[in-house]
Image (cartoon, rainbow, N blue to C red):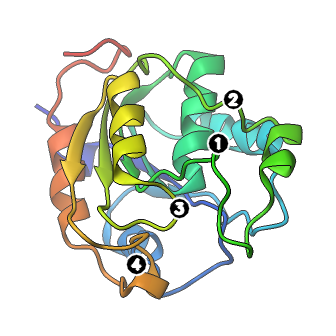
Amino acid sequence: MKDHHEVTVVTVPGLREETPAHWQTLLAHELPNVRSLPALGRTNIDLNARVAAIDAAVLAAPAPVIILAHSGGCIATAHWARRTGGRKILGALLATPPDLEKPLPPEFPALSAFAEAGWTPMPKGRLPFHCIVAASRNDPLGEFARVKDMASGWGAELVDLGEVGHLNPASGYGPWPAAGALIRRLAQRQDVSGVLA
């Protein structure tokens, strides 16, 4: 049985600027084996480049790998899994994925920009590794029912976080202590071949 010290965590941020107070950044400093992708920012939404960056990070990391994605990073991870088969992945924690098929708040790119950059249609169908989707009841970027449907389509375990907004500093997070327990749950899976244990 693996523990979190025997896996490599690859963090995949979403459409935000670098934020030292973000739970994902804080957790990357606490965990023993982490490879972090830079934050995209809200103007750099080239999906092909993001998928290539995820693939390079996973291939360079010692196996097995757990992906820790937030927001748009969840959608990029699902696209990456569709294109690559999810090689080397033990599991993924996908926190508060946004719904890119409905308009986001005005500070985010328009739906047409996401479509032109390849983000939509959203990936559907079972992902080739175990994953946990952590969903918020009051996320301004994705209604709970829509995120629940995403999780079901991906074959993911859904964790209801309650009302935590978008689980980011603007919503009052900071540290997210529950993430460590969810990563440990993923790390305890036996099968690292990409098939559910």
Categorize mark 1 by other alpha carbons within 10 Å: few (<14), some (14-19), many (20+). some
Q: Mark 4 points at which residue?
A: 26
Element on which disc 2 rests: loop
In the image, 119 versus 76, the foreground residue is 119
Placement of the C terminus among the 4 image quadrants: top left
Against 190, residue 77 (above or below) is below
Placement of the N terminus among the 4 image quadrants: top left
In the image, 184 versus 132, the foreground residue is 132
Sooner in the amino-acid sequence: mark 3 or mark 4: 4
Query: What separation in Å lies between label 3 and label 4 (alpha carbons)?
Result: 22 Å
**Could you tell me residue 13's position as x and y percent?**
57, 60
Circles 4, 2 touching at the beta carbon (< 8 Å): no
The numbered mark at residue 101 is 1
Element on which disc 1 rests: loop
**Could you tell me residue 16's position as x and y percent?**
65, 71
Circles 3, 1 touching at the beta carbon (< 8 Å): no
Residue type beneath disc 3: Leu
The numbered mark at residue 141 is 3
Q: For residue 163, which quarter of the picture?
A: bottom left
Circles 1, 2 touching at the beta carbon (< 8 Å): yes
Query: What separation in Å lies between label 1 and label 4 (alpha carbons)?
Result: 30 Å
**Could you tell me residue 119's position as x and y percent?**
73, 38
Q: Name the residue under label 2.
A: 121
Residue type beneath disc 4: Leu
Against 80, residue 145 (above or below) is below
Q: For residue 64, which quarter of the picture?
A: top left
Residue type beneath disc 2: Pro
